[in-house]
Amino acid sequence: MDIDAWLWWLIGAAVLGIGLVITAMPELGMLAVGAVAAAVVSGIFGGGAVAQVVVFAVVSTALIAVVRPIAGRHRTQRPQLATGVDALKGKQAVVLERVDGTGGRIKLAGEVWSARALDTGRAYEVGQEVDVVDIEGATAIIM
């Protein structure tokens, strides 16, 4: 039983794909695509062993050189849509109960929140509009 070279390349691509799923290393996926390209060269174009290895190396290297920097930029970007407590930072609130360095209450995004002043020596009176600078647990830090 003699297995054609293109089938070996596809088996290698499948093994690399399984490795990608198990380890979450995107480079393995790029190597798998290179192996599929080598299988195409072998099966469809009838390329020899040297051509197959060259195509595998060129495609894999090109994908790694192009995709990794793009993926790195996307990994370091902050999400453009803030959700949860991150969406509340920078919002304005209204003081419902005097807020100072030890505590108080504000109305933020239609809900009543406990709050404390960022500057512990400062106090905010009822009705005053304040800015939320941070959220610590269930307490809004205002200024």
Image (tube, rainbow, N blue to C red):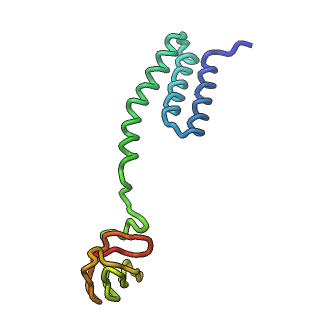
Residue 1, quarter of the rendered image = top right
In the displayed structure image, the side of residue 121 where residue 34 appears, left or right: right
Count of numbered badges drawn on the protein: 0
**What residue sits 31% from the left and 73% below the top?**
132
Question: What percent of the width, then of the height, locates residue 30?
Answer: 49, 31
**What residue sits 30% from the left and 82% below the top?**
100
In the displayed structure image, the side of residue 21 where residue 3 appears, left or right: right
Question: What percent of the width, then of the height, locates residue 143?
Answer: 26, 75
In the displayed structure image, the side of residue 51 where residue 91 appears, left or right: left
In the displayed structure image, the side of residue 129 where residue 107 appears, left or right: right
Q: Is 75 placed above or below 29 here? A: below
Depth check, front residue: 125 or 123: 123
Question: What percent of the width, then of the height, locates residue 31?
Answer: 51, 28
Depth check, front residue: 57 or 101: 101
Residue 58, quarter of the rendered image = top left
Question: What percent of the width, then of the height, locates residue 68?
Answer: 40, 35
Depth check, front residue: 116 or 72: 116
Depth check, front residue: 55 or 64: 64
**What residue sits 42% from the left and 64% below the top?**
83
